Amino acid sequence: MTDEKHWVARTLAGDGEAFERLLGPHRQGMMNLAFRMTGNRAAAEEICQEAMIKVFKYLPRFQAGRNFRSWLFKITANTAFDFLRRAQREKSIISAQRETAELSMPSAEKSHLDREIARRVQACLDYLTPKERMVFLLRDMEGFSVKETAALLRTSSMAVRTHLSRARGKIRMRYPSVRAALDGGPPR
Amino acid sequence: MNCRKFVRWLPLYAGGDLSPRRSFRVEGHLRRCESCRQEAAAFREGLEEIRRELHSLSHVWREPAWRRAVIRAAGSRRLGTGTRRAGSLRDVWAYALLALLAVGLSYLVLAPLPEGDALRAAFAASTRDGAASGGHSLASASRDQDIVSMTLISSETGLKVQWFLNRNFKLQEDIE
């Protein structure tokens, strides 16, 4: 937290490198959240870029006592929702690109097993609504508490519990069949 | 608690997100019900597995792309100011409006002023229009009457004064 305060202060003083140091520890978290929300690498990078621009723009409004990580994920989550809304309006082909998204990862970075797991997880997430997916990812992937997730998404703890319960229920139902289908299917 | 209620609370219970009071009730039920105990264990195991998989997978944000994103975010904008993407629709509208204003102003400055005859013609046209539309001046009551004359005759001395007024009740000095 002290480090964050330091980097925030230096960024506000006009040090561009400090901004990179400030976001560095959350880089993967942001990208994973955006990627799991869209299932598409280009879309995820666009969401993260937009979120970073907002973070830089509104950094002077960030209150020193607050948790920077929560604030950052709040901006990323809202940007992801905006993106999905826009994509739905524009009839984007994100869902069509999903299946190929994982396959487009460089083979050096991902083993065959990892790709299988990624496909399996993404197949489960596809059954969730954007809100359920976001709540599930923030709680079960990023480890935010229900209360933190509620604050982050500007909703009540009860609403978060409802979405979380539905999301886990759906995943529980889908996961064994998706897993069986992938395990039994031909290797790709 | 019955099994139906347990199934409703299971997703939150398995993830440790149920309130302590409800968790206590769930645990009481689990002590009594073997099938729900198995269901809870399977659910918890599945959830843990997917959590592990979510953590083990990390979508790599490669270094060049990451650096480009940071530079774009920090480099192209000033802190705390209303920032816009270059070439955005808002910019286009602003430039279009500015161009329109510039054209309008230059027209006003550079356009030749109407000459004396043109001014008179414009005045005549406007007075005619005023009369036609039932204008406000007295003279406009009649299309042809632009001059009003008033004659004052003293009953004692017989002195006679004649005034000619235009339609705006201004004394016409050049008319005797």
Image: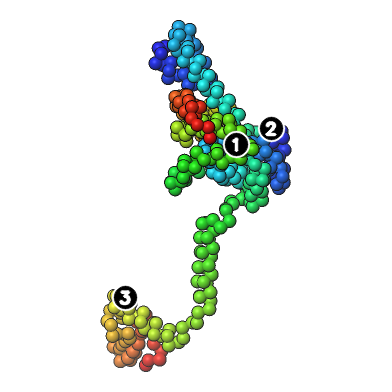
**Rendered residue at 37%/91% (across/down):** B175
| In the rendered image, residues at marks 1 and 2 fall on the same chain | no
Report whether mark 2 lies on the same chain as mark 3.
no
Q: Which residue is mark 2?
A: A1
Crowd around label 3: few <14 · some 14–19 · many ≥20 (10 Å):
some
Q: How is the image coloured?
A: rainbow
Q: Is residue B94 left or right of residue A21?
A: left
Residue A160 can be seen in this image: no
Q: Nearer the viewer, residue A176 or B18?
A: A176
* Labelled pair 2, 3 in contact (Cβ < 8 Å): no
**Chain identifier of the residue bearing label 3 in the image:** B
Q: Position of residue B41 (x, y in %)?
A: 50, 15
Discs 1 and 3 lie in a common subunit: yes
Mark 2: amino acid = Met
User: Amino acid type of disc 1?
Assistant: His
| Total numbered labels placed on residues in the image | 3
Residue at the far top in the pictured view: B32
Residue at label 3?
A: B135
Front-lying residue, B69 or B139: B69
Q: Which chain does the numbered disc 1 sit on?
A: B
Q: Regarding mark 2 in the picture, which secondary structure is present there?
A: loop
Relative to residue B170, is residue A51 depicted above or below?
above
For the N terminus of chain A, the quadrant is top right
Label 3 sits on a secondary structure element that is loop
- Disc 1, disc 3: CB below 8 Å? no
**Label 1: which secondary element:** loop
Residue, x 39% and y 85% (percent of image)?
A: B121
The tag on residue B59 is: 1
Mark 2 is surrounded, within 10 Å at the Cα level, by few (under 14), some (14 to 19) or many (20 or more) other residues, namely few
Image height check: is B24 above or below B111? above
Q: Position of residue A43 (x, y in %)?
A: 54, 44
Distance of label 1 from label 2 (alpha carbons) = 26 Å
